[in-house]
Image (cartoon, helix red, strand yellow):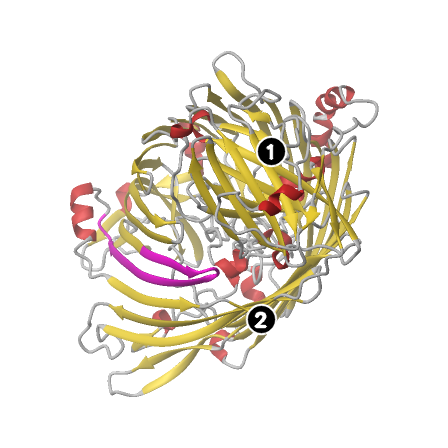
Amino acid sequence: MTAPLPPVLRALGLLAPALTLLLAGAPAHAQDPANPRVYTTQRTSTPPRIDGILDDSVWDQVEWGADFLTREPSEGDPPTGETFFKILYDDANLYVAYRANDPEPDQVASILGRRDNFPGGWVEINIDSYDDNRTAFSFTISASGTQGDEFISEDGDNWDGNWDPIWESRTRLDAQGWTAEVRIPLSQLRYADKEEHVWGIQVQRRVYREEERSAWQPIPKDVNGWVSQFGELRGIRGIKAQRQIEILPYTLAQGERFEKVDGDPFADGASGKLSGGVDGKIGVTGDLTLDFSINPDFGQVEADPSEVNLTAFESFFAERRPFFVEGANIFSSRIAPSVAFGTHTQDRMFYSRRIGRSPQYRADRFEDGYVDQPGNTSILGAMKLTGKTRRGLSIGILESVTARERAEVADDTGGRRDVTVEPATNYFVGRLQKDYRDGETRIGGLVTSVNRNIQDTEVEFLHESAYSGGVDFYHSIMNRSYYTAINVVGSRVAGSEEAILRTQRAPARYYQRPDNKGQSVDPTRTSLSGHAGSVRVGKSGGKVQFDTGAAWRSPGFEINDIGFLRNTDEINQFSWVGYSLRNPFSVFRRMSFNVNQWLDYEYAGGNTYQAFNFNTNANFLNNWNYNASATRENERISNSELRGGPAIKIPGDTNADFGINSDGRRSVSGGFGAGLGRTDDNAGKSSNFWTYVNWRPSNAVFMELNPGYSHREPEFQFVDAVDNAGEDAYLYGALDQKTFDLSFRLDYSVSPTLTIQYYGAPFVSAGRYSDFKRVTDPRATEYADRFRPLDGDLAYDAGTDTYLVDESGDTVTDYEFRDPDFNVRDFNSNLVVRWQYSPGSSIFLVWSQSRFGFEPRGDFDLKNDIDSLFEVHPENVFLIKMNRWFNL
């Protein structure tokens, strides 16, 4: 079926005057970038000692790089203190020396912190060894000796702090300020195999007390791009691509303590295991690196934040596991990657949390007896091949295999059996992208596949295979200031009739909707296909920026086996326009404003959503800052609100929020904020409040306390869909939900290589329902005409926590539904001691605790809820994990 695009084109046409006005202000030709500065290095036959003192005579071979200019708060001014650097190299390493002068050397902020926390004052070097004007490797050293490292991509739009190379550094404080020496193995960089190299470089410094940043290569704030504006490092000759084979085996001992349940053979109160695995990194060529992990363990990773999800859709949680986080930008695959965030912008072809997910068949719900249900699917192995060739071809390949996972079920007679809860599965992602015109034009493609070995009836509801593939095009002009981006994707899933029926009836599409004009449920189908994509134009850099375009997802589009998708059968139009003042004026360091606008259509052509949003934020000269936003959503049509029922009109609403934050460099800092919402037709309201306090009692200790409270009072909250004499009855109620959450974090850095971190987060939420109603006319013009109140037709059965409904008045129950009231209590904590006993090698001591409680009460009493939370028997996990880095 062909999508009716005219509504989208009409919507885009509304923006034409604004776009024409913006484009009229564009320069007639590309603005020449600033002339790059050049630093010339020399080969050394004697490596310097890395002790931070700078007394090795080998440094006399080269001149100091100097003449830094400020970038923050204002640009182009002389910095507070002069900064100098030198660079040497040999066949195996790059060496960097820094001299960071300070007119008040006793005020140098030497603050300890975790790796990649970038505490206090620091210096860093960014190295574009690919010389592709888009990617670079960043190495940061704080005055305290704390290291930070990031992989920079997308010309500075993405800084990946999960990249952790092995390198060496030392710092010293002295009467002039401080100094540092750095050794960067060439094996940690990527570069072409040629006789002479020209690499892009940038050197930066942060003066903490002034919140000042200065740079060796001046880059105006209004110029688009970062890596493409670097200076040049010349003089490197005769180095060969380094042979890189790094192996990181680990061993782990883990013990668990949990509540003992009489009669349950699996809940005996304790368990333990010994395991091991190996991670590795192999330099296949000078351009390509193979990362692999066999039997990976992620026991030191923090738990996800708690929430109560009352929607039809799953929640999106960020990836935290190191193997999948590092280099994730290579597989970036948003279908509509716009800054105009809307309902569709989280959709992505690859969502790594699908790998190793919780088993999808819940034996603990559907099997009789006691059940030992695995918490996660075991990852047998995973590998990534990533890199970029000298001709500008970026390559990313990810392959992972997960185990056939089984739950053990025990009956009352002592018999036991295994039930498959997740089949053995292979996941594959492949990404290619070719740069043209020094990265100003890019053409790429991405393919994904999921193949399951389904041998058991319990998991026949899953797809046997799922494939997706797409192409993307990006083209910029006028010194990368204006761009066009196009993305087109297709998908196909296949499996049993049960699996495809489940897909047709899933919240992303709800083919069973009685008013669905384009699709209907076909219970005999064994496959489903669809397509999606986006078209965008925009401007980046300068004071005025914009992004506008359209995205679509056909009804049959499905990527949730390896991607993330909430809605299909949609066409979205979106626009974002921003204005930024990046240099100090009046009482501000910087300020920005932006507006967003969205229109959504269903494939049949009807408009379903209209919204407008305004945002502003600013930093003051005293380093305080604020942010504020306001959003207006007009009355809309929801195809998913009735969970497979007909589309329904939802009243419009207006929301506003703000936040104020103090100067985070102070020993005590904090902030607070609030949000308010009001729904049209007196159909609901909401409010939330938050605050936080940071305290740094010493240069080695940091504490953060972050409490929040929210109160939701929708008058029209979905409760259930039940059968009423052969017809569906869609039930709603007024909800009074109160939620309190708090997080506490403590970081103690004994040294740059020994840190202690604690994180704890209690969460309580209570919801009480009242004023129950049944939907009668979901598209009625007046809000009150869309439902029938049930107050006089209800009887409550306390023995079964059930409401009995007699609409006919004949004293016979027409239908019933369970009491939806809830009290949810959750607590997650994590204590991690990490000691890097040698470069790349670490020992972890971890204690994790979780508590979860639920009661169908609905009354919120913070003291009693917190007391009840800590009366719940905890689940404790203790583990010791040791790994050892080998460079072969």
Task: Residue at 28% x, 51% y: name it.
Answer: 824
Q: Return the residue found at the far right.
A: 29
Element type at mark 2: loop
Marks 2,1: beta carbons within 8 A: no
Camera sees residue 398: no
Camera sees residue 662: yes
Give the class, few, some or many, for how many residues have Cα within 10 Å of label 1's Cα (few <14, many ≥20).
many
Check if residue 841 falls in the magenta segment.
yes
Q: Quadrant of the C terminus?
A: bottom right
Identify whether 671 is placed above or below 135.
above
Check if residue 651 falls in the magenta segment.
no
Q: Return the residue found at the far front.
A: 57
Q: Return the residue found at the far top.
A: 586
Give the main secondary structure, helix, strand or loop, of the magenta stretch: strand
Which residue matches tag 1?
Answer: 598
Identify whether 721 is placed above or below 265.
above
Residue 516 left/right relative to 644: right
Residue 268 left/right relative to 227: left
Residue 730 x, y percent position in the rendering: 42, 49
Q: CA distance from mark 2 to mark 1?
A: 54 Å
Q: Nearer the viewer, mark 2 or mark 1?
A: 2
Magenta stretch: give its range. 831-857
Residue 411 x, y percent position in the rendering: 28, 83
Which residue matches tag 2?
Answer: 888
Element type at mark 1: strand
Residue 882 x, y percent position in the rendering: 39, 68
Residue 447 left/right relative to 746: right
Type of residue at label 2? Leu
Type of residue at label 1? Trp
Quadrant in the rendering for residue 337: top right
